Amino acid sequence: MTKILHAPILMDEATARLARLQLPPERARFRRLATIKPYGLDHAQEVTELLPPEVSWPQLSDDHIRAYESALDSLHAGRWTESLAYLSRVPSEDQVKDFLTVFIAQHNRTPPDGWNG
């Protein structure tokens, strides 16, 4: 999934929850990327990216992470135009945002019938 999402380090929801408890923001940051049903699994998984602290990687600020996660929340809620507006606040150099942007574009910016996030 790292190649598909363009993120080098991914975690499942349980691992991300534990890591958030163990690592303060000055050591690591986290970004929820998507809810995905990996091939071969019966249920969807929330996938989180592990990021360096903002001091070490200022090109992706905490504000950018919040904008991305707001885009993800809007996507889940079926508000795809709003999701795209949030994604526009994330730098174009951040290839991770391409996953959601392309997904939205492939569906003509409209959630499919029966969309459940």
Image: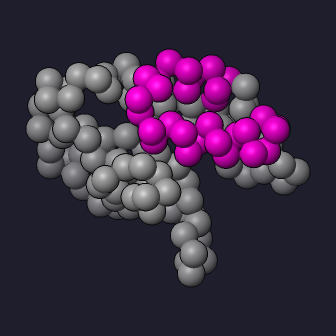
- At horizontal 14% and vertical 29% (from top left) the residue drawn is 56
Rendered position, 56 above or below 27? above
Display coloring: one colour
Rendered position, 1 above or below 75? below
Q: Position of residue 32 (x, y in %)?
A: 43, 44
Please give left or right for residue 77 compared with residue 4 in the image: right
Q: How many marks?
A: 0
| In the image, residue 93 lies in the stretch drawn in magenta | yes
Quadrant assignment, res 12: bottom left
- At horizontal 50% and vertical 18% (from top left) the residue drawn is 89
Q: Position of residue 45 (x, y in %)?
A: 50, 62
Most foreground residue, 97 or 17: 97
- Residue located farthest toward the front when viewing the structure as drawn: 93
Most foreground residue, 23 or 53: 53
- Residue located farthest toward the bottom when viewing the structure as drawn: 40
Rendered position, 100 above or below 15? above
Rendered position, 103 above or below 40? above
Most foreground residue, 90 or 117: 90
- At horizontal 73% and vertical 39% (from top left) the residue drawn is 105
| In the image, residue 32 lies in the stretch drawn in magenta | no
Residue 17 seen in the current view: no
Q: Position of residue 100 (x, y in %)?
A: 59, 41
Query: Which segment is the magenta one?
Result: 82-110
Q: Quadrant of the N terminus?
A: bottom left
Q: Position of residue 108 (x, y in %)?
A: 82, 38
Quadrant assignment, res 98: top right
Residue 75 seen in the current view: yes
